[in-house]
Image (cartoon, rainbow, N blue to C red):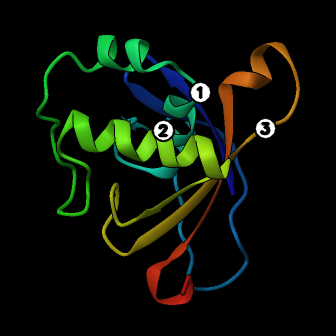
Amino acid sequence: VWSAALIGDQVIVTDGRESAHPVRVALELGRTGPAHAGAGGLLLLSRMTADQVCALYPYEELEPVTPATLTSRTALLDELALIRRTGHAVSRGASVPGMTTVAVPLAGSSWRDRLALVAAAPADRSG
């Protein structure tokens, strides 16, 4: 489990705790990656307006990180609309093959509104 913050079009791991399970997902603090490629970044992007997202992603084509990454701004905007309706984001292998992540917003005010709580598991254990 870790927390993530949005910096421009990148997401950064700000804190985290690893499972004691021998097969686990581990991400180092300070790791960054494209916000459109993973549940934490998608959740945080969903808190922005469509115009703000389009300003961060001025081109229709998005760079894939894995074969499961969203690769168009249109698909990104559709996914963000779904996340706004459900209140959570799910990513299956979009940032790391074989990793499933689920993200929810951290409750609170001020800087906490810009953080996501992300849980990760190997895909074969996440159903």
Q: Amino acid at mark 3?
A: Leu
> Where on the picture, by quarter, is residue 126?
bottom right
**Residue at image location 56% in from the left, 40% down from the top:** 43
The percent coordinates of residue 87 (x first, y second) are 68, 47
How busy is the neighbourhood of tag 2: few (under 14 within 10 Å), some, or many (20 plus)? many
Q: Amino acid at mark 1?
A: Arg
In the picture, measured across the screen, residue 99 lies left or right of residue 107, that is left
Q: CA distance from mark 3 to mark 1?
A: 12 Å
Q: CA distance from mark 3 to mark 2?
A: 13 Å
- Per the image, the residue denoted by label 2 is 41
Sequence-first disc among 1 and 2: 2
The percent coordinates of residue 121 (x first, y second) are 56, 73
Label drawn at residue 106: 3
Local SS, label 2: helix
Q: Nearer the viewer, residue 3 or 23?
A: 3
Q: Are marks 1 and 2 in contact (CB under 8 Å)?
A: no
**Residue at image location 24% in from the left, 37% down from the top:** 74
The percent coordinates of residue 12 (x first, y second) are 51, 32
Count how many numbered circles sit on residues in the image.
Answer: 3
Local SS, label 3: loop
Label drawn at residue 75: none
Q: Amino acid at mark 2?
A: Gly
**Residue at image location 42% in from the left, 50% down from the top:** 38
Q: Nearer the viewer, residue 85 or 108?
A: 85
The vertical placement of 101 against 117, above or below, is: below
Local SS, label 1: loop
For marks 1 and 2, give the one nearer the viewer. 1
Sequence-first disc among 3 and 2: 2
For marks 3 and 1, give the one nearer the viewer. 1
- Per the image, the residue denoted by label 1 is 47
How busy is the neighbourhood of tag 1: few (under 14 within 10 Å), some, or many (20 plus)? some
